[in-house]
């Protein structure tokens, strides 16, 4: 039995919290720099994407490459995190490794090389993800976990926004898009080195009541997690939400950049498409008109070109026809980053505050309730984003983020409070595997495929329905949270 006599935090808990906040911030900066430089990667001739009819599918596959390696390596490192004595050493090694490989992304001279570096970054982050939350849970008692988990979770929108901004600003500068990856190397190495100076906390030291403890094999740990209804429903709802938000996070810069673009067929358009007289004759009826947004321009071209011609020529015509008065890439990343920082940070902290307030009033299923209601709130604004013109669309995006990020703290709190310390790293690792395998691993290529074949609006509508599914799963979880938290201390004793 493991037992902590009171509900106070362990000595050094604040240092653990601050370090994990910094690491998590760097984690999401590294992840989302790629999204910020996506338009430049598509145009870079070394990758051969501009004339490919499936350009967006292949480009979005770079995000999937990272997530596949991340989700498949996380269970292994989660299992190690439940067994090795020096978890901080594993975290430090992971951060240094992924920072070096992130820098190597900027050195890529082919699509295959860039694909490989994204895979290797996922392995590095897979070592940190499941162990970090377990360390946090070991130094903070259950009554404080919701708040501190929210603080660490708040780095998701903040770090992502900084990554978007760094990517778009650097890509649009004289330095070029590759420097966006170089800039994160030294900060990551510094944070990884600090981990080796941290004392190792005892597993389960912050629990406020006796917790059954015994050695558990990896397959038994997984089986135990899957038998906890709250764990299952929290993970399933988070997976559905990640399918939507994770996919959108990869493509949103690209989407806004193209939607705000102004296009007109000019001599430069024909040069970019290497047009012959036959093609010029087909496109002549479209000359002399400005098209606002890539979808509008694509629909006009669809009426003049065959499906095969449009697939082959869409990329060159789009880039060759974009007028200089169209918004530049840099400001798009800054605007979106600002909205994500304010909206995401506010929503993440508010979600945990609301859940904890409900629990203090005796509503023990507050984490599930807030998550489900947040999804229902954000869905209509997400759909409105596709139809409301800019700059008002930025407001729709802000309101959507307010709803869709309310769950970030609560869902992780559910996982921490319903799984025993002895299998907690494994529990978080399994959660990482499932939410990515069935969530944002598959959604970016799906968005890319639908966008290539149809348009941006169709792609976003296809995946928005997953938000509704997440709400249903989380609201169903309200029936189980109290019971599963009460059963957690003796879960290992009864199996």
Image: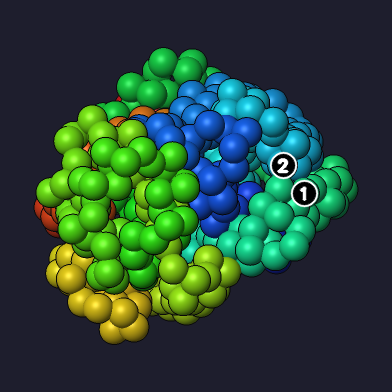
Residue 182's mark? 1
- Give the mark, 1 or 2, whose residue is nearer the N terminus: 2
Residue 119's mark? none
Rounded to the nearest angstrom, the CA distance separating label 1 from label 2 is 6 Å
Residue 465 position in % (x across, y down): 14, 51
Q: Nearer the viewer, residue 310 or 411?
A: 310
Say what secondary structure mark 1 lies in. helix
Q: Nearer the viewer, residue 331 or 181?
A: 331
Q: Name the residue tied to disc 2.
A: 106
The image quarter in which residue 9 lies:
bottom right
Question: As drawn, is 189 to the left or to the right of 319?
Answer: right
- Is residue 245 visible in the rendered image? The answer is yes
Question: As drawn, is 309 to the left or to the right of 249?
Answer: left
Report if the CB atoms under discs 1 and 2 are less than 8 Å apart: yes
Query: Residue at (21%, 77%) from the top-left corner?
Result: 388
Residue 441 position in % (x across, y down): 38, 35
Residue 413 position in % (x across, y down): 41, 55
Density class for disc 1 (Cα within 10 Å; few <14, some 14-19, many ≥20) is some
Query: Residue at (49%, 71%) from the top-left corner?
Result: 324
- Asked if residue 153 is positioned above or below residue 395 in the image, the reply reads above
- In this view, the residue farthest toward the front is 277
- Is residue 254 visible in the rendered image? The answer is no
């Amino acid at each position: 039995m493991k037992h902590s006599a009171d509900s106070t935090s362990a000595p050094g808990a604040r240092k653990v919290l601050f370090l994990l906040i910094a690491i998590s911030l760097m984690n999401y900066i590294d992840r989302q720099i790629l999204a910020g430089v996506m338009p430049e990667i598509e145009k870079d001739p070394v990758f051969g994407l501009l004339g490919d009819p499936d350009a967006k599918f292949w480009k979005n596959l770079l995000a999937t490459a990272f997530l596949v390696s991340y989700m498949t390596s996380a269970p292994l490192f989660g299992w190690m995190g439940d067994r090795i004595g020096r978890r901080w050493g594993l975290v430090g090694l992971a951060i240094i490794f992924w920072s070096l490989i992130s820098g190597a992304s900027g050195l890529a001279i082919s699509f295959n090389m860039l694909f490989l570096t994204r895979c290797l970054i996922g392995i590095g982050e897979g070592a940190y993800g499941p162990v970090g939350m377990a360390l946090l849970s070991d130094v903070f008692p259950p009554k404080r976990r919701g708040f501190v988990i929210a603080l660490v979770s708040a780095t998701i929108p903040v770090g992502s926004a900084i990554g978007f901004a760094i990517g778009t600003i650097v890509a649009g500068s004289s330095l070029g898009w590759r420097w966006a990856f170089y800039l994160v190397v030294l900060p990551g190495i510094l944070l990884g080195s600090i981990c080796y100076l941290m004392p190792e906390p005892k597993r389960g030291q912050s629990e406020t009541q006796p917790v059954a403890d015994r050695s558990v094999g990896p397959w038994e740990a997984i089986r135990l997690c899957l038998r906890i209804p709250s764990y299952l429903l929290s993970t399933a709802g988070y997976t559905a939400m990640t399918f939507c938000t994770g996919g959108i996070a990869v493509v949103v810069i690209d989407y806004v950049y193209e939607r705000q673009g102004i296009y007109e067929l000019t001599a430069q358009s024909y040069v970019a498409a290497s047009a012959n007289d036959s093609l010029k004759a087909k496109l002549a009826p479209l000359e002399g008109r400005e098209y606002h947004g890539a979808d509008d321009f694509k629909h006009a071209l669809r009426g003049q070109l065959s499906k095969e011609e449009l697939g082959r020529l869409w990329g060159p015509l789009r880039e060759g026809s974009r007028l200089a008065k169209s918004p530049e890439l840099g400001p798009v990343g800054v605007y979106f980053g600002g909205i994500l920082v304010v909206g995401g940070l506010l929503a993440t902290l508010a979600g945990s505050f609301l859940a904890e307030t409900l629990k203090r009033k005796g509503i023990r299923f507050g984490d599930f309730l807030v998550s489900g209601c947040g999804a229902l709130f954000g869905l209509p604004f997400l759909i409105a984003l596709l139809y409301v013109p800019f700059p008002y669309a930025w407001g729709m995006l802000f309101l959507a983020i307010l709803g869709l990020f309310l769950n970030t703290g609560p869902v992780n709190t559910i996982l921490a409070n319903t799984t025993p310390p002895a299998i907690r790293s494994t529990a978080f690792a399994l959660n990482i595997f499932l939410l990515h395998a069935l969530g944002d691993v598959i959604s970016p290529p799906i968005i890319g495929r639908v966008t290539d074949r149809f348009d941006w609006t169709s792609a976003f509508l296809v995946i928005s329905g997953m938000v509704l599914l997440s709400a249903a799963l989380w609201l169903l979880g309200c029936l189980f949270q109290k019971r599963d938290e009460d059963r957690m201390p003796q879960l290992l004793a009864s199996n």
